[in-house]
Image (cartoon, grey):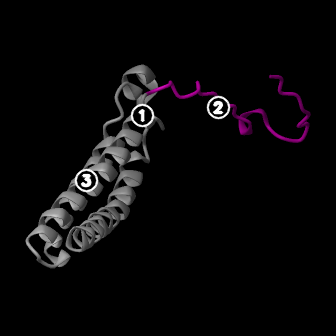
């Protein structure tokens, strides 16, 4: 932790040293992981349940689109919220919260939302297709 050097030809006012404390630990990644896991399980179980019922009534698994799009949207919103509201990070940062802590989180959350919406829809639809097919055969 030592800074040494020689800058003989530079005026004194051209050098600056900026120091910032490391970001405090937060449970943000726990909430993001919980939102990702819960959204995946919700999509999977919702698709499986709807697919089983559709198969029992001898209907096409395409009817599961009525539930797969909303479940994908729920997963996407949960991911966005888990990135936007990181509990404890801003409070622990104190006066440095205005600097960089969590600045890019809404952008990452928006990207996660864009990704998880179609993924949630596809996971739900695939689970419904498999469950419907198993129910019709057995």
Dots 2 and 3: beta carbons under 8 Å?
no
Few, some or many C-alpha atoms within 10 Å of disc 3 (few <14, some 14-19, many ≥20)?
A: some
Mark 2 or mark 3: which comes first in sequence? Answer: 2
Read off the residue under disc 3: 45
Q: Position of residue 85 (x, y in %)?
A: 31, 37
- Of 1 and 26, the residue lying toward us: 26
- Mark 1 → mark 2, Cα distance in angstroms: 31 Å
Q: Quadrant of residue 11?
A: top right
- Mark 1 → mark 3, Cα distance in angstroms: 22 Å
Magenta extent? 1-26
- Of 91 and 68, the residue lying toward us: 68
Q: Quadrant of the C terminus?
A: bottom left
Read off the residue under disc 2: 18
Dots 1 and 3: beta carbons under 8 Å?
no
Instruction: Give the secondary structure at mark 1.
Output: helix
Q: Position of residue 45 (x, y in %)?
A: 25, 53
Q: Position of residue 44 (x, y in %)?
A: 29, 56
73 in magenta: no
């Amino acid at each position: 932790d030592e800074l040494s050097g020689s800058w003989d030809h530079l005026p004194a006012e051209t050098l600056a040293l900026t120091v910032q404390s490391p970001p405090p630990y937060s449970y943000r990644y726990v909430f993001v992981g919980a939102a990702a896991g819960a959204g995946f399980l919700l999509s999977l179980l919702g698709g499986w349940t709807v697919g089983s019922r559709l198969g029992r009534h001898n209907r096409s698994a395409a009817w599961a689109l009525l539930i797969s799009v909303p479940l994908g949207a729920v997963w996407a919103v949960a991911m966005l919220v888990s990135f936007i509201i990181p509990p404890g990070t801003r409070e622990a940062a104190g006066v440095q919260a205005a600097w960089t802590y969590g600045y890019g989180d809404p952008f990452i959350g928006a990207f996660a939302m864009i990704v998880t919406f179609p993924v949630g829809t596809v996971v739900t639809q695939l689970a419904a297709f498999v469950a419907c097919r198993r129910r019709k055969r057995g």
